Image (cartoon, helix red, strand yellow):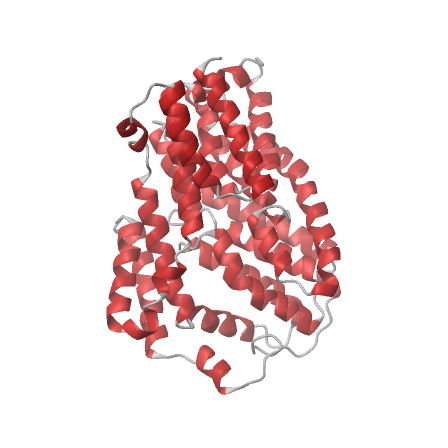
């Protein structure tokens, strides 16, 4: 059996084992990189570890460390509280506020599943308190993370743009961000109408935490303080330095986090424990395995097989469909780094537009995250009320299944077929 085929079977095994036994995909990917690289490819340990994505590791650790501080000192609570106040009693706007806050968090660097974990308890609590459909709220929050999910300084944006750059192609980070922003807003608007958002009654809305009494603890979480002001300043500083001075977001984020930790050591001493280490392990493991695939020639092998169909646009559509199907049952975070290299030969040969293909693959592989089998969908389901959980599960499964079919078709028609470069 050829090394290429062995590495493909190992990749399939990674997804299967992750789904059946809930083992971290990144850990499996590291093990597979070692075993496949050594036994099938004759690679040395140094060769395997050379593919470790050090820059992305810094982005993940730095950004999630900073947001762990923001969550611990109540900055995120303050942001959500003030955002909900803006609706001024218009209940139908609450899901849109949750979408906006989710988009803001991911746009400035939060990992989408982490943003969902932050927002989900508040969003689903508000849904229960004011009679808003929990399915509608779930869809709006997850689409919100994708509205901002591919900004140039977001984790997903850094991953995708990094893979494109490493492949020697000239991508378009701004088009990727714009395409995901617009398409997810459109999906959210359609879902809002179909899931009864327009029928939401106009009743007074309070900005208090859902179901909580207006006690001293709540007031302390939502009132502005010195720690919150400094954290907000730190986040703004990170955005400015990375966008306008083009400094590395991982190094900037961890520097800001360390400064905040030094200023308030007691308040932030446990923040490092809340870094999303499972996500760090997942992404770094998958990208390390992808480097082994590239070293073995597997990426070219698969790409040539797909391209061998003889119809480049059909090949492109099949890649988007594969991304949507796999991501609906696994982590899109890990999939992004593994899938885009498969389309590199198509893009390098000029058979499809680079910007359109990259955006199409990225969106098709992430818009299905609402599936209850994917991380973000599972988090929303877990935060729904017990009596509604079964109906929410069925709704998320139906909506996620629809996205698996609809998203690849739409991105193919709007981005890939027109040949957007």
Identity of the residue drawn at 44% across and 20% down: 298
Work out whether 124 lies above or below 226: above
Q: Nearer the viewer, residue 352 or 66?
A: 66
Q: Could you tell whether 216 is left or right of 124 in the image?
A: left
Image location of residue 181, percent across then percent down? 52, 48
Image location of residue 219, percent across then percent down? 48, 83
User: In the rendered picture of this protein, how many numbered marks are placed on residues?
Assistant: 0
Identity of the residue drawn at 53% across and 86% down: 215
Work out whether 114 lies above or below 210: above
Identity of the residue drawn at 41% across and 24% down: 36
Work out whether 332 lies above or below 291: below
Q: Can you tell which quarter of the image residue 75 is in? A: bottom left
Image location of residue 332, percent across then percent down? 52, 41
Image location of residue 381, percent across then percent down? 64, 57
Q: Can you tell which quarter of the image residue 326 is in? A: top right
Work out whether 98 lies above or below 210: above
Say whether residue 173 is visible.
no
The quadrant the C terminus occupies is top left
Say whether residue 130 is visible.
yes
């Amino acid at each position: 059996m050829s090394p290429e085929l062995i590495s493909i079977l190992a990749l399939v095994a990674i997804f299967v084992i992750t789904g059946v036994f809930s083992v971290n995909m990144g850990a499996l990917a590291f093990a597979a990189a070692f075993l496949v690289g050594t036994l099938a490819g004759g690679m040395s340990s140094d060769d395997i570890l050379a593919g470790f994505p050090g820059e992305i590791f810094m982005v993940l650790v730095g950004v999630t460390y900073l947001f762990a501080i923001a969550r611990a000192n109540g900055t995120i609570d303050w942001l959500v509280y003030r955002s909900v106040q803006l609706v001024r009693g218009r209940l139908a706007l609450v899901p849109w506020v949750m979408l906006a806050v989710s988009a803001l968090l991911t746009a400035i660097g939060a990992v989408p599943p982490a943003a969902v974990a932050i927002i989900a308890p508040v969003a689903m609590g508000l849904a229960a308190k004011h009679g808003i459909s929990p399915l509608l709220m779930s869809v709006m929050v997850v689409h919100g993370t994708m509205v901002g999910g591919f900004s140039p300084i977001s984790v997903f944006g850094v991953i995708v743009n990094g893979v494109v750059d490493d492949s020697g192609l000239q991508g378009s980070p701004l088009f990727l961000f714009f395409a995901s922003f617009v398409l997810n807003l459109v999906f959210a608007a359609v879902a809002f109408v179909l899931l009864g958002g327009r029928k939401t009654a106009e009743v007074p809305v309070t900005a208090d935490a859902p179901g909580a009494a207006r006690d001293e603890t709540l007031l302390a979480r939502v009132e502005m303080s010195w720690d919150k002001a400094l954290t907000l300043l730190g986040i703004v500083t990170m955005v400015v330095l990375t966008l306008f001075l083009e400094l590395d977001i991982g190094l900037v984020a961890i520097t800001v986090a360390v400064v905040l930790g030094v200023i308030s050591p007691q308040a932030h001493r446990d923040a490092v424990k809340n870094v999303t280490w499972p996500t760090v392990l997942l992404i770094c493991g998958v990208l390390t395995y992808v480097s082994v695939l590239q070293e073995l020639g597997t990426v070219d092998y698969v790409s040539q097989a797909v391209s061998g169909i003889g119809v480049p646009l059909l090949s492109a559509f099949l890649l988007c469909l594969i991304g949507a199907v796999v991501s609906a049952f696994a982590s899109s975070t890990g999939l992004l780094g593994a899938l885009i290299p498969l389309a590199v030969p198509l893009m390098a040969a000029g058979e499809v537009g680079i910007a359109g293909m990259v955006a199409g693959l990225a969106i098709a592989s992430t818009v299905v995250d609402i599936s209850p089998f994917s991380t973000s969908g599972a988090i929303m389901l877990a935060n729904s009320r017990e009596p509604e959980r079964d109906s929410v599960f069925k709704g998320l499964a139906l909506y996620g299944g629809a996205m698996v079919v609809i998203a690849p078709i739409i991105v193919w028609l709007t981005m890939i077929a027109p040949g957007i470069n």
